[in-house]
């Protein structure tokens, strides 16, 4: 039987004394003990209720945060798609420009309206939290993307990138009402996302885009060749002439095939094959056969502009020297050159310079040799 030390009052000579009682619980002792337990029980219940209220509040808030996260993912998808759509429109604008126009391009009101309009159409056609999205003009920015620093700089001068914000906020598309978070006094939540797409170094070229059966060796770049530097396409086999002639993917590369290709370029019938950096290989013949020089001069005279410039879009082949190769060589990228001289006297000469910051028709995502593709990719 349990025992409890307790005190009971006794009266002696009109005075009361507390006397320790170690007997089996007296009625008085049991009553006192019961009151103590009741007081403790009441406090425990109150603490338990407070804990439950807090836990329910945080659980409710977690449900709202989870819903906000899902809506943020929807906003991210819309921002990315809108950035890609607008940047693809920008790439299409570059496709219609001459090389000279690209160099001096500043996006005006017409170009902005076209690019921004494509992005805004994506917002209208898509939802976030069951709300079709309005993308205001001040949430769309043209600019330039740095591949080196991975940064976006807003500008209208030769823009190559677009940043788009998609929002569910009080002033734009309405914020989110907290269905459960109100238990903790949270009535509304704001959510946003941004996407950035850019015209990046070209990695894949569709059929019909390469302009001549000429390639530039990677060794030219290894030797220090860069934007604006001269290069000769005939004669080849030197540091300045680090280039060669090919028959595209038609193996073996022979002089008669090169002759046929140039004839078809002159007549307008030749279509170069689809070419993917790192996958496609071309058949090289080495140096240009001397008999083909007159045909090349005819093609140059047909293609050059009033200033004597012929912009050519060419493949980069992978070799570690400047000797004209023979056989199949892997194409690793693409570059743009400006041919300025095709002259037979005093000796045959084809001279050009490599140009950069040019947009050509094709898909980005390749190695940077100075030419960007008109089909963008997400970069941020």
Image (spheres, helix red, strand yellow):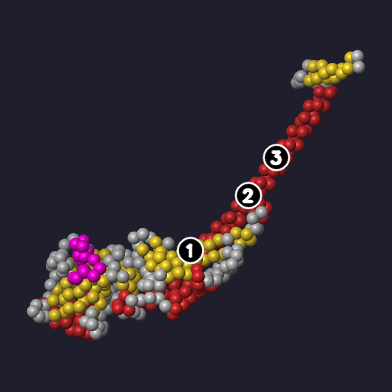
**The image quarter in which residue 231 lies:** bottom left
In this rendered view, identify the residue nearer to me: 169 or 120.
169
Asked whether disc 1 touches disc 3, contact meaning CB atoms under 8 Å apart, the reply is no
Q: Work out how far the residue at label 2 is from the one at label 1, CA to CA, in angstroms.
A: 29 Å
Residue 216 % position (x, y):
21, 68
Q: Is residue 220 magenta?
A: yes
Secondary element at image label 2: helix
Q: Residue furthest right?
A: 14
The residue that mark 2 highlights is 58
Quadrant assignment for the C terminus: bottom left
Q: Give the range drawn in magenta.
A: 212-231
Secondary element at image label 1: strand
Q: Which residue occupies 38% across, 70% down? A: 160
Q: Is residue 127 magenta?
A: no
Tag of residue 47: 3
Residue 379 % position (x, y):
40, 63
Q: Tag 1 or tag 2, which sits nearer the N-term?
A: 2
Q: Which residue occupies 38% across, 60% down? A: 150
Residue 79 % position (x, y):
49, 66
Secondary element at image label 3: helix
Q: Work out how far the residue at label 1 is from the one at label 3, CA to CA, in angstroms.
A: 45 Å
Q: Work out how far the residue at label 3 is from the one at label 2, CA to CA, in angstroms.
A: 17 Å
- Please indicate, yes or no, whether residue 81 appears anywhere in the rendered image: no
- Please indicate, yes or no, whether residue 10 appears anywhere in the rendered image: yes
Q: Tag 2 or tag 3, which sits nearer the N-term?
A: 3
The residue that mark 1 highlights is 194
């Amino acid at each position: 039987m349990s025992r409890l030390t307790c005190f009971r009052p006794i009266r002696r000579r009109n005075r009361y004394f507390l006397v320790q009682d170690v007997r089996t619980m007296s009625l008085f002792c049991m009553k006192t003990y019961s009151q103590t337990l009741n007081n403790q029980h009441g406090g425990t219940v109150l603490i338990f209720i407070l804990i439950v209220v807090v836990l329910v509040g945080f659980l409710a808030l977690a449900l709202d945060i989870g819903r906000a996260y899902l809506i943020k993912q929807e906003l991210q998808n819309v921002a990315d798609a809108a950035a890609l759509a607008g940047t693809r429109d920008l790439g299409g604008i570059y496709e219609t420009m001459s090389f000279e126009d690209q160099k001096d391009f500043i996006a005006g009101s017409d170009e902005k309206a076209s690019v921004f309009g494509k992005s805004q159409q994506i917002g209208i056609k898509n939802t976030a939290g069951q709300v079709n999205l309005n993308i205001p003009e001040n949430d769309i920015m043209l600019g330039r993307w740095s591949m080196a620093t991975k940064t976006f700089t807003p500008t209208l001068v030769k823009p190559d990138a677009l940043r788009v914000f998609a929002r569910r906020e009080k002033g734009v598309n309405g914020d989110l009402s907290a269905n459960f978070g109100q238990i903790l006094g949270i009535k509304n939540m704001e959510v946003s996302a941004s996407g950035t797409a850019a015209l990046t170094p070209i990695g894949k070229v569709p059929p019909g885009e390469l302009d001549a059966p000429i390639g530039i060796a990677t060794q030219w770049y290894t030797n220090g060749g860069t934007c604006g530097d001269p290069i000769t396409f005939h004669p080849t086999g030197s540091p300045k002439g680090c280039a060669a002639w090919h028959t595209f993917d038609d193996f073996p590369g022979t002089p008669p095939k090169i002759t046929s290709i140039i004839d078809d370029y002159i007549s307008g019938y030749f279509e170069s094959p689809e070419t993917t950096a790192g996958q496609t290989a071309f058949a090289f013949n080495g140096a240009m056969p001397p008999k083909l020089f007159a045909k090349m001069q005819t093609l140059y005279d047909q293609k050059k502009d009033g200033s004597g410039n012929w912009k050519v879009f060419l493949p980069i082949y992978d070799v570690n020297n400047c000797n004209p190769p023979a056989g199949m060589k892997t194409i690793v990228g693409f570059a743009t050159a400006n041919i300025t001289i095709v002259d037979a006297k005093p000796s045959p000469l084809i001279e050009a310079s490599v140009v950069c910051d040019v947009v050509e028709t094709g898909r980005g995502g390749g190695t940077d040799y100075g030419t960007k593709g008109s089909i963008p990719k997400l970069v941020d």
